[in-house]
Image: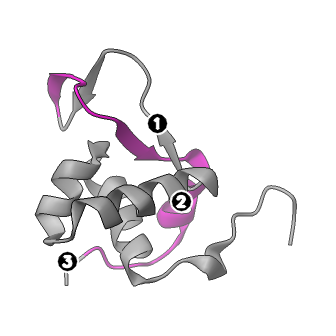
Amino acid sequence: MSKTSLPWEKLDHKDWEILKDLYKDGADCAKFIARRFGWDLKETIEKLKKLEKEKFLKRVKGRFAIIRGKLKHMNHTYYEVTREVKLYFRRSKYSFKRS
């Protein structure tokens, strides 16, 4: 395994769901991710922090961001997938149908 390779083997089903959702729909915060999937907010926050620590996600910097084509004031911490995750999904033939 190379130095830049991400620990893909550590991901569970919910981790994959978060990564697919953020890749497909763009940056979002824990509150709306938890609401969209019907998950506990605290668990979702922990998952996002873990994925950020392992370099799958990065925080969106600044006070404003364009989220799904709309200018948003960032009252929450917004996360987006890293470049390596984007490249992985672009190269894969993975289907992005919601389960």
Residue beneath the point at 22% across and 68% down: 40
| Outermost front residue | 42
Residue beneath the point at 87% across and 64% down: 2
Quadrant in which the N terminus is drawn: bottom right
Q: Decide: is 7 above or below 33.
A: below
Q: Position of residue 25 (x, y in %)?
A: 25, 52
Relative placement, left or right, of 6 versus 12 is right
Residue of label 2:
50
Residue beneath the point at 34% across and 72% down: 17
Relative placement, left or right, of 63 versus 33 is right
- Label 3 is placed on what type of residue? Arg
Which SS class for mark 1?
Answer: strand
Q: Position of residue 7 (x, y in %)?
A: 69, 70
- Label 1 is placed on what type of residue? Arg
Which SS class for mark 3?
Answer: loop
- Packing grade of label 3 (10 A; few <14, some 14-19, many >=20) is few
- Circles 1 and 2: CB atoms closer than 8 Å: no
Camera-side residue: 62 or 47?
Answer: 47
Q: Position of residue 58 (x, y in %)?
A: 51, 41
Residue of label 3:
98
Tell me where the magenta segment starts and ends, as one range.
Answer: 69-96
Camera-side residue: 14 or 84?
Answer: 14
Q: Decide: is 56 above or below 98.
A: above
| Outermost top residue | 63
Q: Earlier in the sequence, mark 1 or mark 2?
A: 2
Q: Which mark is residue 59?
A: 1
